[in-house]
Amino acid sequence: MDEQTSNSSYQHSTIEEQSSYRRYSTAENTNNNDDTTPSTRKCPWGKILVATILIGIVTFVIIDSLTTKYISTGFQEFLTWIESNLVAGVFAFMGVYFIATVCFVPGSLLTLGSGFVFGSAVGVGYGVVLASVAVFVGASLGSIAAFLLGRYLMRDCVRRRLVKKYPVIEAIDEALQNNGLKIFLLLRLSPIVPFNAINYIAGVTGISLKDYVIALIGILPGTILYCFIGASAGGLAEAEQEVPQPVTIASIVVGLVLAFIAVFIASRYAKKEFNKIIEQKQNSEAGEGGHHEEDDMIDVEEGLPVDEQNVETGVDMDN
């Protein structure tokens, strides 16, 4: 009888220790979650400051293009200065194009003007090559900077509030993360896709920096075309005018086709990723359900009286 009493006491103490351990683990996890919650809710003053400055610059650019056009006049004077300072002008042009790309300033005026300026200085052939290189370097560096700004400012917020909550957006994000090079290369080839806007949008998506940089090759055909049109103009004022109508129509048609292909490919990959995400969630829910059932069975067995446990195990305590 004493042996039965001691075994019963030992089992009850073991159950109490396991229950205490579970309560401690649950409390510890809750405390950890509570500790991490305030840190994620800290106000990102750096991001707010950068975003405010950027929005102010973009607002000024839009208002200026509709009213005083100081930026357009400044570009004309800058291109005129390049004609008499060719070597320094090439590097200065790259820097100005970099700033213009980050600040949402349309680059068509600089691209056409560079074709004319460099074409007049060294001839049409070499001028197109020099202008294309300068535009490509300045635009690419500006695009990378805009991409990093977009990722720094909005990626965490979008991922936390949209990607993790909505499977469709998560599928699109996964498709861009796994196949972003193909999609963005087609978008870059399309002249109707806003160049400056897509830089910041790409930073919010899951595309890697490596794929994004490689996809910038897609801006070369349009860059060469615009530089050639500028180099063929009779003057700087003519180069700054609109592109000839046949070229505009052809650009729109080609751009629509390429944009449609890019959307088709993106939707196709997104559908595959969406199916994978749904399947993974179903498997994880099924796994969690199995673990809960096992825990319930263990709790029931631990909660049985000692005599019933002995009956189940076939042990006779009276002996």
Image (tube, helix red, strand yellow):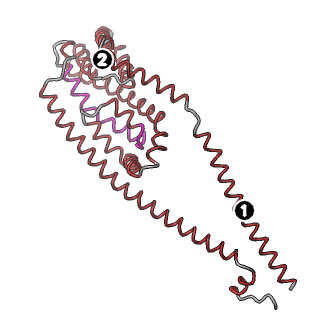
Task: Categorize mark 1 by other alpha carbons within 10 Å: few (<14), some (14-19), many (20+).
Answer: few
- The kind of residue on which mark 1 rests is Tyr
Foreground residue, 303 or 174? 303
Above or below 34: residue 313: below
Foreground residue, 220 or 285? 285
Q: Mark 2 highlights which residue?
A: 65
Precedes in sequence: disc 1 or disc 2: 1
Q: Mark 1 highlights which residue?
A: 21
Task: Name the residue: 26% across, 28% down.
Answer: 223
Q: Residue 9 at what x, y percent from top left?
A: 82, 75
Foreground residue, 155 or 82? 155
Magenta-tinted stretch: 203-230
Above or below 271: residue 46: above
Write down the quadrant of residue 188 in the picture.
Answer: top left
- The kind of residue on which mark 2 rests is Ser
Q: How many labels does the image show?
A: 2
Image side of residue 186 versus residue 141, left or right: left
Considering every residue shown, the one lying at the far bottom of the view is 319
Foreground residue, 129 or 113? 113
Q: Residue 230 at what x, y percent from top left?
A: 21, 20
Q: Residue 178 at what x, y percent from top left?
A: 39, 49
Task: Give the spatial CA distance, label 1 vs label 2.
Answer: 68 Å
Image side of residue 35 versus residue 242, left or right: right
